[in-house]
Image (spheres, grey):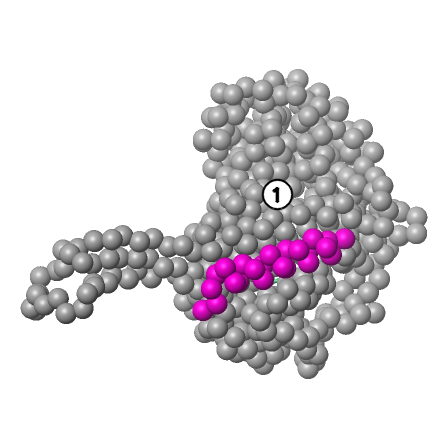
Amino acid sequence: MYKIKNAVDGKLVESSSERAGAIFNPATGEQVGELPLSSNEEINAAVANARAAQPDWGQTPPARRARIMFRFLQLLNENVQDLAREISREHGKTHEDALGECARGLEVVEFACGIPHMLKGEFSRNVGPQIDSFADRQPLGVVAGITPFNFPAMVPMWMYPMAIACGNAFVLKPSERDPSASMLAWELFRQAGLPDGIFNIVHGDKSAVDCLLDHEDIKAVSFVGSTPIARYVYERGTRSGKRVQALGGAKNHMIIMPDADLDAAADALMGAGFGSAGERCMAISVAVPVGKETADRLVAKLKPMVEAIKIGPASDETAQMGPLITRAHQQKVLDYIDQGEKAGADLVVDGRGFSLQGYENGYFVGGTLFDNVTQDMSIYQDEIFGPVLSVVRRDSFEDALELIHGHQYANGTAIFTRDGDSARSFAERVEVGMVGINVPIPVPVAYHSFGGWKNSSFGSHGIYGPEAVHFYTRLKTITARWPRGVKEGAVFTFPS
Ligand code: NAD
């Protein structure tokens, strides 16, 4: 059994905390590791270290910071198989899926390599007689990231590469379920030449999060996780004067119009609904076919596909879907299937009885398909975060749009259609942050920014991309007059 350490000031540090958390292999249910649940003293020490290291880093020319970022990118590419294995071992997702996660995380590091260009600032000559004005984006100081279990490498990479490239020091509190991928990335960043104290990892639970949220030397917090915690982090962090971006949960709808290519739509629903066992914030969990005929044909196509999903541990190269993250989460998903059945939805494929020989204690749930789900049911209202796809039938495009607008979550959505009018109208009118047109998981690339609307996101900045430069820096505007010695006497009116 391995023991995870904190990473502070360029070193791995044995924790002195009396509290520890267990790390499990979700495919077997066995404990494989342990991590410290750090004390406030340990968190404070990490922040103090980061604070001491940041000014030099903030003064380091952006091009030099970018060179370290390039080396980090190279090392990540050389070690990507190991990174994916670390993800799968603790999260349970298939190796191919973990490699996909790495690719999307590395994209952000690629983007961060261009930081000199993004920090160029603005300059206006002669805004007044011999007066020039320029605007400069300066780092905030020490910033923190708090991340969920479902993308243990990618979601932290949405944060620290951009924050660090902007000249900040970073303290990461990764998910206590699967911390190892971030530990490997930390080691690679260190090898790339990042100065000590600029990237730190402290492990912990709510108490560590609260300590970071209240710490006066933490200037900004990026959070990704479930909506109740996102809202809490946003409120508590902003109350202590911090800049906070807090991304929450989701219930993503996909409209299937009568003119859509139904085979393509069914394939898309399989990948987006059941990939990573539905544990993605951009998973499609609600299919909204328009018209009875579309719905009947779609459900007939999906049923055998859901029944045929190959489920297995990450070590099985043929597996399409792995286990859920914890026993408690497995039970929660099974409870939702019970609730859906009791509420009167048609259980077309029931994933409850699934068991795998040799992995009987793993946290598996089979692919599950419900038809005729209605708006009042808990399986529609709540984020289940499991391999459960609900079909909610609607008679028209307008009804489908209204359905989406009635939901509290607004992270991602998609429409499948061959009709440009419907697609364009959907993109323009739908009140959701990220929209796909014949693309089921419209996660923006690294040079755009990611973010949902409504209860899927709190705070005004999207994560990564150009928005990250704004989030992790503050603007200073300097108005300068040269040469010195111009004398115009005391002026009491407003400068114009
Ligand atoms: P979670 O909210 O349970 O945990 C996220 C982080 O918050 C973890 O680091 C955890 O230690 C910490 N935390 C947990 N309880 C806390 C508390 N009471 N007080 C303070 N901190 C606490 O989320 P999770 O189960 O790890 O991840 C799944 C959730 O994340 C889903 O809801 C999913 O939709 C969401 N998610 C959203 C996005 C997005 O971009 N919007 C991306 C990935 C995941």
What residue sits 76% from the left and 31% below the top?
Answer: 348
Residue found farthest to the right: 357
Residue 468: percent from left, percent from top: 48, 54
Magenta span dominant secondary structure? helix
For label 1, being within 8 Å of ligand 1 is answered yes
Residue 25 placement: quadrant: bottom right
The amino acid at mark 1 is Met
From the viewer's side, name the closer residue of 348 and 83.
Answer: 83
Residue 332: percent from left, percent from top: 71, 51
Residue 484: percent from left, percent from top: 18, 68
Please tell me whether mark 1 sits on a helix, a strand or a loop.
loop
| 246 relative to 334, above or below | below
Relative placement, left or right, of 100 versus 460 is: right
62 in the magenta segment: yes
Relative placement, left or right, of 218 versus 77 is: left
196 in the magenta segment: no
Q: Which residues are magenta?
A: 59-81
In the picture of the structure, the residue carrying the numbered disc 1 is 282
Quarter of the C terminus within the rendering: bottom left
Judge the density around disc 1: few (<14), some (14-19), many (≥20) Cα neighbours within 10 Å: many
From the viewer's side, name the closer residue of 187 and 191.
Answer: 191
